Image (cartoon, rainbow, N blue to C red):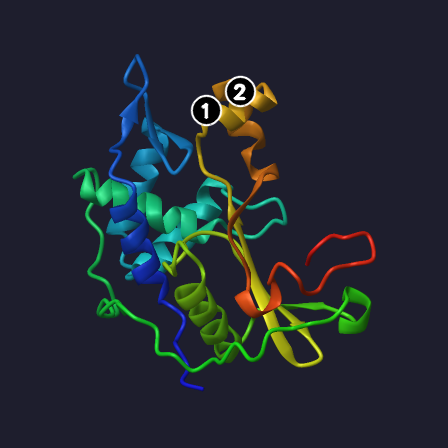
Amino acid sequence: MNQIGQPSSESIVTESVAANSRQASKSADGSLYRYVGREFTEVEMEIVRTLCLDPAYPTRASISRALCRSLGWTKPDGGLKDMSARVALAKMAADGLITLPAPTRPQPVPRRHLEATIEEGPVLACSLGELGSVSLVKVDTRSDSATWNELIGRFHYLGYTRASGAQLRYLAISNGRLLGAIGFGAAAWALQDRDTFIGWDAKTRRQRLHLIVGNPRYLILRASRSSDVCHSKQGGQI
């Protein structure tokens, strides 16, 4: 199987900036800047500018990590929100508020098509009990990443696009056979229907959005979801 490499962090940041063209929004009194769901005060913006000029931090990655440490910008598990900081810094630079060092790696040429290396196999004709155990295997190797990308790119109606931010991906496998793929990611910043259903105002959403998980991709291969196969005793389908 040909491996499709993981995107670099710099390419993820570039695509994140391009995918969200919304510029910085200022509060009514002009004292706050908003990027990637976080509000930056003028004092914090001065910290950002100081870090960008400090020779101790010659790369965008080192600046983003230093910024997270300076502002206490961390994830619920205590890790630095490095990728969010990278996206915020890129947006600030695009808005002319700061000057960042040049990227240390060239931007990769995006792939338009994923090479076909996976065969779906014959249609399954069995009960769920006969199928046996189904495992969700976390995608954490380059080979599994290539498999997941290809499955989504070739067989999911939305196709494959590089995801940005926090994400978890899994392959569904039974007895060595691929059945499908599923992906989870950070929740969208604002969805009116979702926020209305939950009962969130803007302040509550900012405080609790990290508790929401998105499900951007869910795939069961066609050979595993024919209308007359893989039914459980209760009549459901996998």
Q: Does the image show residue 169?
A: no
Residue 68 appears left or right of 18: right
Q: Position of residue 94 (x, y in %)?
A: 19, 43
Look at 38% across and 79% down and name the residue there: 116
Which of these two is toward me, 182 or 202?
A: 182
> Which residue carries the number 2 mark?
196
Residue 183, image x, y percentages: 54, 57
Mark 1 lies on a secondary structure that is helix
Q: CA distance from mark 2 to mark 1?
A: 6 Å
* Residue 17 image position (x, y, % from top left): 28, 47
> Can residue 5 be seen at all in this image of the molecule?
yes
**Corner quadrant of residue 15:** bottom left
Q: Which residue is mark 1?
A: 192
Residue reaching furthest left? 96
SS category of the residue bearing label 2:
helix
From the viewer's perspective, tell me whether residue 166 is left or right of residue 4: right
Q: Is residue 141 above or below residue 195?
A: below
Residue reaching furthest to the bottom:
1
Picture coordinates of residue 236 (x, y %)? 73, 52
Type of residue at label 2? Thr
Whether residues under marks 2 and 1 lie with C-beta atoms below 8 angstroms apart, the answer is yes
Who is closer to the viewer here, 98 or 20?
Answer: 20
Residue at (49%, 42%) from the top-left corner? 73
Residue at x 35% of width, y 51% of height: 86
**Depth check: 212 or 182 in front?**
182
Q: Quadrant of the N terminus?
A: bottom left
Query: Could you tell me which residue is drawn at 56 percent across and 46 percent down?
Result: 75
Between 54 and 52, the one nearer to me in the picture: 52
29 relative to 124 in the view: left or right: left
| The C terminus sits in image quarter | bottom right
